[in-house]
Every structure is written in structure tokens, then in C-alpha cells.
Amino acid sequence: MRKMEIADPEVMRIAIQQEISRSDESRYDHRLHGLLLVTGGQSCQEVAELFGEDRRTVQRWVGRFETRGLEGLREGERPGRPASLDARQWAALERDLQRDPSKFGHVAHLWDGKLLSEHLRLRYGLKLGVRQCQRIFGQMGFRLRKPRPQVAQSEPVKVSAFKKTAVAGKA
């Protein structure tokens, strides 16, 4: 019998690994297949090379299986880093963001990541980076709105005629 070959096996291997990582169930099945090979006599190193995993990963699968059985192979909760703000502080921050920043002594009149970072440091004693502060806006349901620049001493009639978007109420 002739050996079957897959065109572009490296690309297909990556695609298959990505497909496995898409769901909890397929990752569980992947671990089961790995353990099946280990119980069949292959070493963790051999299984790791075959599956494109690290040897320590396969060893962890075996260890979890030996201590907790099949449930040890299922996806567990990943707690992640603890929240920086408790529920009360989170609600207070949400109220803060609905107010003008100048009410808190800030020079700016619009909230952005940099200003929120400074506000958290001053008011809550919390140091977060600008990007993390931008994520907080999204988690709270806020979206970025930048004011359109207005040329000083411009004529409102000419400005409205030039705008791409119609003014509300006018068609």
C-alpha cells in the first residue's frame, strides 16, 4: 500500500493545532490521545514531539491524570490576576467617569487613558498603565469620542455646509 501524503504538511500541522486549541472539548480530546499513547508505551518526550507540545506539558497531563483521573484533563478555572478595584471602587470610578474631569481638579475636559491613569493614581492609589486604562473604558461600556477641531472664528453656516454629516433635525 502506498504511503499517504498531505500537501504542505507544516502549514497543515499548524492549522490542525490551531483547530485543537479552539475549544475546551478538543483540547480535552487532545490530552486523552496523548495519554493513550503514553499508556501504549511511548515516552512523554515521544508524545510531545508527535503532538508539537513541550515534554513538560505531556508530563503535567500524566501527573494530573494520575492524581485526579479524567477530570484532571479537563480545562480548569484560570483565576488570573486579582482585580485591582473592588466592586465599590469600580462603581465609584464609573460615576467619576460620567463627570467632567475638571470636577476632580484635572486640567483636561475629556477622559482618556492617560488622564484615567493619573486619576486612578491620585484618587485610588492605584498605578495602571495607559493601555490598561483604555481597556477599563471598554469594560465599562464607554467608547472613545474625540471632539472635531473647530477653526477659531469660523462661520457656523459655512462650517455646517462643509461637514460630511448632516446636523440632527435637518435633512
Image (cartoon, rainbow, N blue to C red):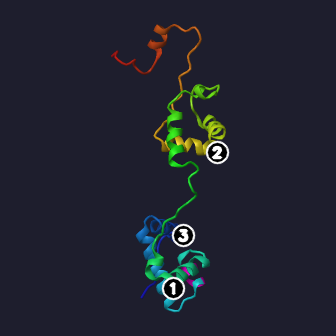
Residues rendered magenta in the picture = 45-50
Residue under circle 3? 10
**Helix, strand or loop under label 1:** helix
Report the residue marked by disc 2: 126
| Cα gap from disc 1 to disc 3, whole angstroms | 33 Å
Taking the spot 64% from the left edge, 28% from the top edge, the residue there is 106
Q: Position of residue 8 (x, y in %)?
A: 51, 69
> Of 110 and 20, which appears nearest the observer?
110
Locate residue 70, reporting x and y percent: 44, 81
Nearer the camera: disc 1 or disc 2: 2
Q: Are marks 3 and 2 in contact (CB under 8 Å)?
A: no
What residue do we see at 46% from left, 40% from top? Answer: 141
Q: Along the line of sight, which residue is nearer the eye, 152 or 87?
A: 87
- Neighbor class of circle 2 (other Cα within 10 Å; few <14, some 14-19, many 20+) is some
Which secondary structure lies at badge 3? helix
Q: Residue furthest front?
A: 88
Q: Give the label on residue 66, or none.
A: 1
Quadrant where the C terminus sits is: top left
Cα separation, mark 1 vs mark 2, equals: 43 Å
User: Which amino acid type corresponds to the residue marked 1 in the rendered image?
Assistant: Glu
Is 171 positioned to the left or the right of 41 in the image?
A: left
